[in-house]
Image: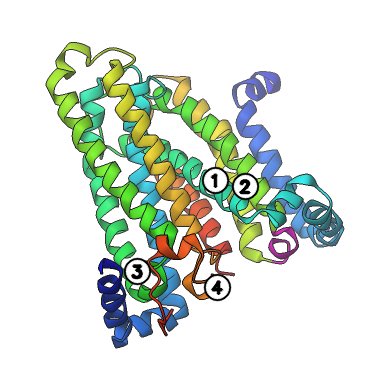
């Protein structure tokens, strides 16, 4: 049911002229993809600096709350541009992307990243005054930083794997388990 | 007097020598004659080395290491941006820039090592293609420039004295140049994928 809805939505996007124009435009698509990757460097660069600070590997002499607060804004700016360009990349190739196992795993991981970020900030704000100047954050915060590094690394790996067609509906048999994960529709004509 | 001058400006003299050597290499067309002799190495890298074999045979390993390359570039980007935006007076203004510079350099060094190691693996899998790409060579040149700039100009200067004793415009130019060079490295790296 949900897969049919996603497929219909993807077909609707695919039918729009702008989707085709973006997909077919060599330079525009490449520009959007380049901006997506470069802003990923900005966003993850800032985020990883915060995480590495909590783990004691970067900026150990700077108060942790200061780093988390000040780097948040450039990180969010990077994330906003990355998010917009990500939507544009999806819009350019909606059917194949929505039926990619890697893209689906990436979306789940992004939700995990968001939940982890919320918990991380909540825990940090609750207790930061007691360990702000420590080289390493307490265990609970450090676990949050490790999860953040791990989840985002997996997001990047999945994002990279989306380009590969090993599990695409078009190239797998209908009895293949990957078809279930990809949400392939029996008898679908567009890929 | 000459030895005094040389000891004070050893790094600058070394850098001037490198720049002169590059100019001479280009002027006497040494580069043009070296370039064809590099092809067998690139072919060996792809078809005979074990990293080339791994990259060609296992797409998932190649993609994962490529993601590792991207992550290490993100950490490099983070350290460069935090340091340089502080030097430009945009970020973390209430924290001494010496603290920021020292606190990020270790991360930069390790990330650069990972980026180079994973980059060699990535290049090995498509060595016969990248050899013919001008953008690949621009990236290598930018990487060399960025590393040289970081270890022979930026860090020695920033560590030489308290930053308030350095001319503010020198610091700003240093930071802007650093951002520009590392942006070039990242952008040309991305463009290799499109060529």
Up the image or down, A22 lies above or below B152; here it is: below
| Secondary structure under the numbered disc 3 in the rendered image | helix
The mark nearer the N terminus, 3 or 4, is 3
Quick one: B19 or A28, which is closer to the camera? A28
Report whether residue A152 is seen.
yes
Cα distance between the residues tagged 3 and 4:
20 Å
The magenta stretch is B126-132
Pointer 1: what residue?
B69
Residue A171 marker: 4
**Which quarter of the rendered picture does the C terminus of chain B lie within?**
bottom right
Quarter of the view holding residue B99 = top left
Cα distance between the residues tagged 1 and 3:
23 Å
Pointer 2: what residue?
B119
The residue furthest front is A175
Cα distance between the residues tagged 2 and 4:
30 Å
- Output the chain of dot 4: A
**Which quarter of the rendered picture does the N terminus of chain B lie within?**
top right
How many neighbours does mark 1 have within 10 angstroms: few (below 14), some (14-19), or many (20 or more)? many
Q: Is residue B129 magenta?
A: yes
Report whether residue B171 is seen.
no
- Picture coordinates of residue A26 (x, y %)? 47, 79
Closer to viewer: mark 2 or mark 4: 4
Left or right of B104 on screen, residue A132: left
Q: Are marks 1 and 3 in contact (CB under 8 Å)?
A: no
Tell me whether marks 3 and 2 sit on the same chain. Answer: no
Quarter of the view holding residue A20 = bottom left
How many neighbours does mark 4 have within 10 angstroms: few (below 14), some (14-19), or many (20 or more)? few
Pointer 3: what residue?
A90
Cα distance between the residues tagged 3 and 2:
27 Å
């Amino acid at each position: 049911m949900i897969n049919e809805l996603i497929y219909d939505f993807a077909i609707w996007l695919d039918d729009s002229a702008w989707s085709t124009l973006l997909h077919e435009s060599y330079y525009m698509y490449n520009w959007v993809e380049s901006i997506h990757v470069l802003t990923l460097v900005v966003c993850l660069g800032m985020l990883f600096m915060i995480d590495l600070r909590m783990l004691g590997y970067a900026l150990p002499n700077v108060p942790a709350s200061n780093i988390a607060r000040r780097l948040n804004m450039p990180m969010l700016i990077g994330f906003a541009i990355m998010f917009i360009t990500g939507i544009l990349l999806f819009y350019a190739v909606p059917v194949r992307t929505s039926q990619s196992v890697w893209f689906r795993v990436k979306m789940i991981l992004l939700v995990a990243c968001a939940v982890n970020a919320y918990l991380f900030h909540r825990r940090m704000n609750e207790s930061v005054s007691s360990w702000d100047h420590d080289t390493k954050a307490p265990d609970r915060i450090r676990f949050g930083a490790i999860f953040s590094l791990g989840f985002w690394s997996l997001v990047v790996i999945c994002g990279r794997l989306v380009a590969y067609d090993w599990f695409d509906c078009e190239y797998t048999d209908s009895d293949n388990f990957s078809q279930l994960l990809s949400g392939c529709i029996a008898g679908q004509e567009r890929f | 007097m000459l030895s005094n001058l040389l000891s004070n400006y050893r790094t600058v003299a070394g850098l001037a020598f490198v720049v002169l050597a590059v100019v001479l290499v280009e002027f006497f067309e040494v580069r043009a004659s070296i370039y064809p002799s590099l092809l067998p190495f690139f072919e060996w890298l792809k078809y005979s080395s074990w990293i080339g074999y791994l990259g060609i045979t296992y797409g998932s390993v190649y993609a994962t290491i490529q993601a590792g390359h991207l992550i290490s570039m993100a950490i490099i980007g983070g350290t460069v941006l935090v340091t340089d935006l502080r030097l430009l007076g945009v970020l973390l203004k209430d924290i001494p820039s010496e603290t920021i510079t020292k606190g990020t350099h270790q991360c930069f060094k390790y990330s650069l090592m990972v980026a180079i190691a994973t980059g060699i693996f990535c290049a090995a899998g498509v060595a016969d293609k990248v050899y013919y790409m001008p953008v690949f060579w621009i990236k290598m040149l930018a990487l060399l420039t960025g590393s040289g700039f970081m270890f022979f100009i930026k860090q020695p200067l920033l560590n030489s004295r308290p930053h308030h004793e350095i001319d503010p415009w020198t610091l700003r130019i240093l930071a802007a140049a650093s951002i520009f060079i590392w942006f070039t490295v990242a952008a040309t790296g991305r463009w290799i994928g499109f060529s």
